[in-house]
Amino acid sequence: MAVDNGRPEGKGWRLCRIPFWGGGGGGSGGGSSSTNSSASLTQHSHRSSSRSQVGQAGQPVSAVPDAGRRHSSGSTVKAVARSLLPTRRHLRLDPPTKLYFPYEPGKQVRSAVRIKNTSKSHVAFKFQTTAPKSCFMRPPGGILSPGESIIATVFKFVEHPENNERPMDQKSKVKFKIVSLKVKGPMEYVPELFDEQKDQVAVEQILRVVFLDVARPSPQMEKLKRQLAEADAALEDRKKPPEDAGPRIVGEGLVIDEWKERRERYLARQQVQGVDSV
């Protein structure tokens, strides 16, 4: 049956037009109901969070432990991120990964490594070893200006082979590590620099020990001899006392000795006094 436009709607039609509770598309009544519901939920959530921050005695719960945990978590994240980043080296080593020692059982032998500062700032370096009782370095550390290089000498006592091992087959468990630290300008080197700024210390390289047969010529042995000779020459230069400036030179080859100059002034005064007495 057709429905006339002027007649009121039937009962079934009116039921279909009633908006659902909580819906957002059923007219003004439905929108108001949805808004009121959201507001009540927001207030309930706010009251719940407020109650969670109040203790049993009515005192506010301190937020310091949460802040400490967040700070600790942030530091951990930074440390992990720093460990994942590639290490930016400040020094260049030659040899880069090994320390060559002549194999002479029962003797103290030497190796050498050239350390060069390739950065644009002053860098402190320090040697570390797994065998401090049988090995030592000269110098054990220092500060290099930009572009400066130094040859460090490493001393090691070579043990006799065990269990009838062949001399060149024995593997040394001793390792050396060179660490670096950027510093502000030239200063006196002290090992405590690395303890005060542990988070800024970078591992440059871990060097392993390689023995060379002294009876067999090799490029590594020849290079080691050259570096040791250069290191010895630099050490002798550092031992020399500062050069004396010597007598002052004035004019064309006129040498004035302090004692001679003082004697001449004394004789001149004596002559003047003699003339006055006459």
Image (cartoon, grey):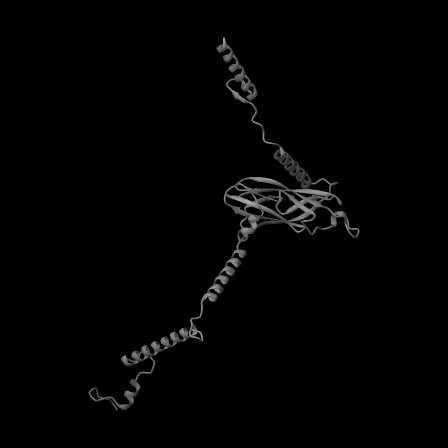
Task: Work out whether residue 24 can be spotted.
Answer: no
Looking at the image, residue 10 sits to the left or right of residue 237; the answer is left
Residue at the extreme top of the image, as rendered: 278
Q: Residue at x 54, y 56 (%)?
A: 83
Q: Residue at x 69, y 45 (%)?
A: 156
Looking at the image, residue 7 sits to the left or right of residue 174; the answer is left
Residue at the extreme front of the image, as rendered: 277
Res 238 → quadrant: top right
For the N terminus, give its image quadrant.
bottom left
Looking at the image, residue 11 sits to the left or right of residue 45; the answer is left
Q: Position of residue 81 (x, y in %)?
A: 51, 58
Pick the residue in front: 215 or 63. Answer: 63
Q: Position of residue 14 (x, y in %)?
A: 28, 87
Task: Work out whether residue 40 can be spotted.
Answer: yes
Q: Position of residue 188 (x, y in %)?
A: 55, 42
Q: Position of residue 144 (x, y in %)?
A: 55, 42
Report the number of discs. 0
Residue at the extreme right of the image, as rendered: 164
